[in-house]
Image: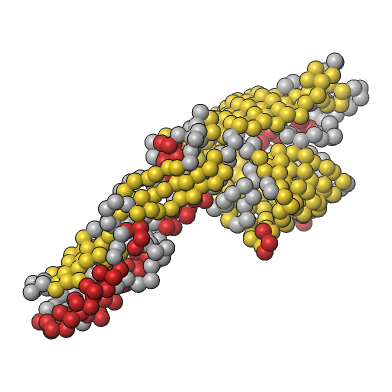
Amino acid sequence: MVIGGRLEPAPALNNPERYLGYNKGMRTIGVVLWMLLWGVVHAQVMVRSVQLEGVSVAPPEQVGASLYRLIGTAPTAEQLQEALQQTEAWYHTRGYTLARVVDYTLDEAGTLRVEIAEGAIEAIEVRGNKRTRTDVLRRLVGIRPGEVYNEERIQRVRQRLGRFPFLRDAKLGAEPADQVGLTNLVLQLEEEQSLDFAVAAGYTSEQGFIGYAEVVETNFAGLGHRARVQWQREQVRNPLTGEYEALRPSYALSYEAPRALPGAFNFGIEAYDRAPFYPVFYADFDTLRRYERRRGATVYVGLDWRELFEIRLRYRADRVDYDDAPANLLSTGERLANRGRFDALGVQVIYDTREGRFPRSGLYATLLAERTVGGDFRFTRVMGEARYYIPLPNQHTLMLRGVAGAGSDDMPLSEQFWIGGYDLLRGYDLDEFRGTRMAVGTVEYQFPVLEAVQAAAFVDVGTVWSRGVPFERVPVRLGVGAGLRFASPIGLIRFDLAYGKRGFAYLSLAGTY
């Protein structure tokens, strides 16, 4: 005699039966009939072996551990039902919320056969895209037909998709497939304008054009790639003559392609001939770093891991100098000592669980370590940043930010850590302080005032120092203020009023939210 039946499921997450096409009523009848049969013959049947069918996410002995423990026993109907429910629970606690035991039999030889439908994905459908290519969106999702639906991974993919600026809204979920036991993954999206630009420029008959311009395309050719062109030209006041002089123009071009290579690999390249880009109008013209000149290129290849991690291998080839710096800011000897070229290799790790333009929860963290492999300089530097968002009632958010860095004592000026200004340590002059070690912390309270507009109140604390300075003599500086944030595809536009050593007003473009 062969005994078999279907198991009444435990309470399901997200009602999986409607995705997999199960008939709950028929399963209940099957359980009742099977229990009646089992009551007649259970004393004569002992479980001697277990065979699990349809298992792919882990070894059968691991998935069905509760069933394998029945070997050598003659279980009652209740004991077998409990073991089958524990098998389903093994899947659900690991995010496989659609997995179900769909059938089982125990034959006269004592072989317990259990059939499991894990909820494999039959197809991936994309709806609502007008510009972005469907194959590109499937690649950005990163899940392939045949993989088992896992709600935890799907949630991580939702978070990653929410960070692409060319997607205004992206919903990812399951729908029933034609075949019982399978499901379809559906991406329903609404696209955002992907081309944006910012211009702040002026003209004088003596100096020509000055200002800042930036053009960003976040969905180049419908590929989901990001292309950026930047131009900047500033005036500086010669501290000896008091006359205003125009700096040489600065240029930068960058291109980033997420998941453009086979698998989950990304790549990016940037070429530049520039002074440090300051996307802000600023009144202090005597900052040494304004005279820094950097020519070169940076290339990286990255790998997305578990949707939230990215590991990048970076190569940087730079030629730097301070040849335009006036003598009162940098002596001839210091100018020569900080002129040269170098090649550097680096490894960067990025972890990001944020979602949306104005994140209300999640963690962003990155760590970059670099070491020169050739050129005129020899140095090692490590820099890390973390931003943690704490959701509060009424759509308010508390953002905690920490930035720290350390490098070898032989780093040139161009590679040291500079703080002060609109980004790190507001309330002070731009790049007012520098050193080979750095630590900056920010507490920022954010709340919405209009759609795509936030207000914020903040406190910044920071310091830089170099080796040999006693810790108790390291100066710690404080800045406080308030401002507004405007979301745009080009990044976050920020207007801040801050007070540190004196009052400052900053209007800037931030690279990240």
Say which of 389 and 448 sits in front.
448
Name the side, left or right, on which 16 lies relative to 418. Answer: left
The correct choice, above or below, for 173 with respect to 16 in the image is: above
Q: Residue furthest top?
A: 205
The residue at the point 48 percent across, 38 percent down is 129
Q: How many marks?
A: 0
Name the side, left or right, on which 479 lies relative to 392. Answer: right
The residue at the point 14 percent across, 73 percent down is 3
Name the side, left or right, on which 46 lies relative to 432. Answer: left
Task: Specify whether residue 165 is in view.
Answer: yes
Which quadrant of the structure image shows residue 136? Answer: top left
Q: Position of residue 400 (x, y in %)?
A: 67, 56
The residue at the point 66 percent across, 52 percent down is 402
Q: Position of residue 380 (x, y in %)?
A: 59, 40
Q: Residue furthest front?
A: 25
Say which of 478 and 332 sits in front.
478
Q: How is the image coloured?
A: secondary structure
The correct choice, above or below, for 249 with respect to 44 in the image is: above
Say which of 331 and 204 sits in front.
204
The residue at the point 22 percent across, 66 percent down is 103
Q: Position of residue 303 (x, y in %)?
A: 45, 42
Q: Position of residue 389 (x, y in %)?
A: 63, 56
